[in-house]
Image: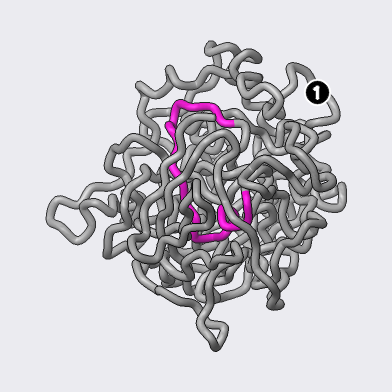
Amino acid sequence: MPPTMTRSFGALVLMLSAACAVACGARSSLDIFVGSESGSNDSTGESGTGSSMRGGGSEGRDGGAGSSHGSSGSRDASGSDEGGIGGGDGGGGGGGGTVPLPPSCAPRGLGMTNCGTGTESCCTSLEVSGGTFYRTYNPVGLDGGAARALDGGPLGEADLATVSGYHLDKYLVTVGRFRQFVRVWNGGNGYAPAAGSGLHTYLHGGQGLENSGTAGSSGATYEPGWVASDDSFIDLTDENLDYCAEDSTWTSSATTQENLPISCVNWYEAYAFCIWDGGFLPSEAEWEYAAAGGNQQREFPWGATHPGSDSQYAIYGYDNGVDCYFPTPGACTGVANFAAVGTTLAGAGRWGQLDLAGNVAEWNLDWYAPFTDPCVDAAGLTTADFRVIRGGGFDRDAPAILPTYPEGRYPSGRNGDVGFRCARVP
């Protein structure tokens, strides 16, 4: 597994084993339709186990949570508009009436229109209401869950950020959806994103996310969108998508794995897919905001209940990534330990997204760097070595699936425990 980087949390780093120190993360024009929101679990419970990468080490880093509230608008699986959003190559629109499926689900079929109970579009996207939140809170406790104050509230709040409302896909991108992108890429002779596409065009007067490294200065800069020279990093051959061996969910032709989350795609391919599908990658602040339940600053995306070992809340692992809970507790073997997207219904976040913890970690837009303040609709856009991933994978221990736990991976690297989901205009 490629190297993993995590940001240090100083004195709050807790030694979970002699070999591994872990801390909670902190630092710093196609119409689309969205679907109905599912509920979330907000009960309290016990907390989890230690954390480390399977086949690789990790250092601790500190993380955040948030504040937001409001109901979530939606469109049902038939395309009937109840909340109204639009997009395409990062653009925005609004809408009423009926809109077509995003291109990754338009052909219909396995991994495209049979998610949830089996009849929901896998492209369902749900509104996340905007607000202000702390990106850093709740350092990892010795039992693997997040530490809490005696009154049950959050600890260590820092790194305030404001996130405007947006839509975040309910499901991770499936093998079936990604297959449609591979087809239009057509061996490098077909689709490539337009230069400058993939922006959050509804922010900062159309300039998109502000670079948190220049925020508040007279020389503020904004997200560049797709860079044409990055076309060369899109290389969707069977050989590359199978690079992760037993942890690759891709198959050269449609099989029984179409509803599994796609894995072993690099950051550039994830970003290009989302642009093609009418959206963009979420910023780190946007992703964490949704996973933390905004101002509720949840211990896990569903609440405080420990995920346990029965795979009702999350698909994850134990014993420092050696063992997996799904489908039954035992040694991790690869594809058999992935679950179809949306399997863990009890793990729904505040706004209804599923698999925000576990199954596969998720590429975020940001470069991996310390948090900077202020952060108002901003992202880490200053070039660094790694891009951010969040959420933890099928083989990660409980601390790695906390909303506040971030990591970094090489953007051109392929990782069997990393996939993604797309964000879209409000």
The image shows residue 157, relative to residue 377, as above or below, that is below
For image coordinates 59% across by 48% down, the residue present is 392
- In this figure, which colouring scheme has been used for the structure? one colour
Q: Can residue 298 be seen in this view?
A: yes
Q: Nearer the viewer, residue 164 or 5?
A: 5
For image coordinates 79% across by 51% down, the residue present is 343
**Residue 401 lies within the magenta run:** yes
The span shown in magenta is: 397-415
Question: In which quadrant of the rendered view does residue 143 lie?
Answer: bottom right
Question: In which quadrant of the rendered view does residue 137 lie?
Answer: bottom left
The image shows residue 361, relative to residue 203, as above or below, that is above
- Amino acid type for the residue under numbered disc 1: Ala
> Residue 299, position in %: x, y?
58, 69
Q: Can residue 426 be seen in this view?
A: no
> Residue 187, position in %: x, y?
58, 11
Instruction: Pick out the residue farthest to the bottom.
Output: 151
> Residue 339, position in %: x, y?
78, 43
Residue 103 as seen in the image, left or right of residue 218: right
Residue 303 as seen in the image, left or right of residue 1: right
Q: Mark 1 points at which residue?
A: 254
Q: Nearer the viewer, residue 331 or 315?
A: 331
Residue 72 as seen in the image, left or right of residue 18: right
**Residue 271 lies within the magenta run:** no
How many numbered badges does the structure rendering display? Answer: 1
Q: Name the quarter where the N terminus is drawn.
A: top right
For image coordinates 43% across by 32% down, the residue present is 410
Residue 151 as seen in the image, left or right of residue 319: left
- Which structural element holds mark 1? loop
For image coordinates 39% across by 33% down, the residue present is 226
> Residue 95, position in %: x, y?
60, 55
The image shows residue 180, relative to residue 210, as above or below, that is above
